[in-house]
Amino acid sequence: MIDIETILIQDVLNPATLPGAIFYAGLFLILATITSTIVRRIVHRFLEQDHRPSADRTAVVFLSQLVQVASFLVAAILYFHLVPSLRSLGTAILTTASVASIVLGLAAQNTLGNLISGVSLLLYRPIRIGDIVRVDAPTGQESGLVEAISLGYTTLIGSNSQKIVIPNSVMVSNVIVHLNKEEFA
């Protein structure tokens, strides 16, 4: 007579067997999906209810997306570590990811510089939306009302209603002068 409990313990709950590996893959995928969904719903509710200027919507959305991606990455790493036959594959994937990140980092230095500068602007807040500033851009001095701060670029509206888009790496590396409304006009 076959004992169901013995089969369950020996095959399904053992990550070294194929049924066990499939069971844990499904389990980790479900857990990562649940975590990602919970984070997305919490952020969505927060953004619907919070209309204060203290909450930077760009930063909140960016961080929530980062947490969602991280939940799937952590689930995959734990899965590869749990299944004995996939440990060497997990090591190879991590090695490949390391080499690929170096190549991509070198290829996208300007883009990554703007992204890191955007995070810096969001964290340190030398400027905020609605500020009137003058910056030393590569094209000369530019003045305008800060309309938007994204992760890559800062958008100013100039005195003649022109839109000035400045890479965040320029915004972080140059002197920013805050102006009052009389100086801007």
Image (cartoon, helix red, strand yellow):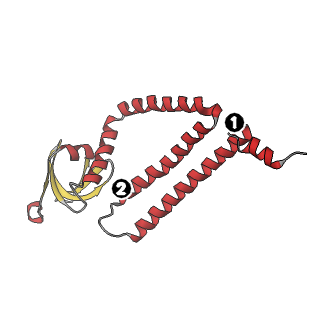
| Label 2 SS | helix
Q: Is residue 88 above or below residue 146?
A: above
| Label 1 SS | loop
23 displayed left or right of 36: right
**In the rendered structure, which disc, 1 or 2, sits on the residue that comes first in sequence?**
1
Q: Is residue 66 above or below residue 41?
A: above
Visible in this render: residue 158? Answer: no
**Are the residues at dot 1 and dot 2 in contact (C-beta closer than 8 Å)?**
no
Picture residue at 64% right of the left edge, 37% below the top: 83
Across and down, in percent, residue 145 comes to: 20, 59
* Circle 2 Cα neighbour tier, 10 Å, few/some/many (<14 / 14–19 / ≥20): some
Residue position for label 2:
59
Q: Is residue 159 above or below residue 22?
A: below
The front one of 44 and 162 is 44
State which quadrant residue 163 falls in: bottom left
Q: Residue furthest left?
A: 183
Picture residue at 87% right of the left edge, 45% below the top: 2
- Image quarter in which the N terminus is found: top right
Q: Is residue 110 above or below residue 44?
A: above
Label drawn at residue 16:
1
* Circle 1 Cα neighbour tier, 10 Å, few/some/many (<14 / 14–19 / ≥20): some
Check disc 1 and give the amino acid type.
Answer: Ala
